[in-house]
Amino acid sequence: MATLDELRREVRDINGEILQLIKKRLEITEKIGKEKKKKGIPLKNWEVEKEVIEDAEKTARRIGLSSSLAKRIMQPLIEESCIQQEKLHYSACAENKEQILIIGGAGGMGTWFSSFFQNQGHDVLIYDTKGDVGPFKSVSSLEEGLPLATCIFIATPIDTISEVIQQLIHLNYPGLVVDISSVKGLLTETFKKGVKAGLCLTSIHPMFGPQAQTLSDKVLCICDCGNDKANKKAEGFFKSTALRLVHFSLGEHDQMISYILGLSHFLNILFMKILSESPFSLSRLEQLVSPTFLSQLQTAVKVIYEDPSLYYAIQSFNPFKDTLYQDIRRDADDLIKCVEQNQRDKFIGIVEKCRDWLH
């Protein structure tokens, strides 16, 4: 029987072999990137990403491994390959090439969509009051950009989108119009007015940020504004990717977002606010760090370093915020009273009820 030291040496040897294979994989994907550039093939093939993940899951099941483990291993490998190939950035022609105008293209998601569409082979134009944006062609006004565009994606701040749509109505824009805002309630009446005026209008919500390098395990919401043609055309841009497309009404979307984003952002900011106003420095608290604290801190830090203006807009413009805040106050008070009034059984019952919800 092998000794413990021998088994550990064997594991170290296997680790080395795994790293050698990863290095070999990256060398091959770099060659693939160069061949794509040479042949004018789009840099990122989101359909291939989907196939790689699915193939890894099938292989894992066949050899007796967890398919979720296979996915977790493949995702960072795909992401590293994408980062590697970004150095060879370029655009190429798609079969159904569109001329896409990104209004608000200087922002984080505007830039992400610009890169995504360019890598899909479409022509991308930017209109942003901040001026030119990196490698993308820019126009100085909507009047200049509209005649050049077959599709428009609106990536401006939430409180400016209604004004943009009103301008598109006034200018009788005939192409597809897509809003990408995080909450829709503020825009519902404008959407109705736009569809009634003849705009080919729909609304989407990418449930990921501008840092996304891969799309596996990520979600894109398509929110129906009353124009089925617009919904289908917008969906077509993403069908060949690894994104999971989900459909919602405008109201249902915002109600869910009040929990998915509103609640999670609020609690993480509250967590950081309480810590920052405590009598302890971060370095002092980290001396007694626990797995629970560390996990929560890592998530909260990510939230704190995101765009606070966007997070405020998600809180402020969601029509379901009052219900959410009532729930937060009620349930926080409920937990505090359990402890203050020595209601041990009630406290345990709350935890058990949460466990039941998970199943």
Image (tube, rainbow, N blue to C red):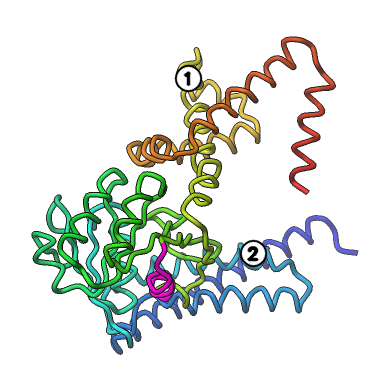
Q: 279 or 110: which is nearer to us?
A: 110
Q: 133 or 30: which is nearer to us?
A: 133
Q: Main SS of the magenta segment?
A: helix
Tell whether 99 sits left or right of 26.
Answer: left
Q: Residue furthest top?
A: 341
Which image quadrant is residue 177 in?
Answer: bottom left
First-in-chain label (2 vs 1): 2
- The residue shown at (49%, 69%) is 78
Residue 4 drawn above or below residue 287: below
Identity, as a three-letter code, of the amino acid under mark 1: Ser
Question: Does the magenta portion include 230?
Answer: yes
Residue at image mark 1: 281
- The local secondary structure at tag 1 comes to loop
Q: Position of residue 258 (x, y in %)?
A: 51, 41
Q: Which residues are magenta?
A: 226-236
Residue at image mark 2: 15
- The residue shown at (9%, 66%) is 144
Dot 2: few (<14), some (14–19), or many (≥20) neighbours within 10 Å?
few
Q: Position of residue 223 (x, y in %)?
A: 45, 59
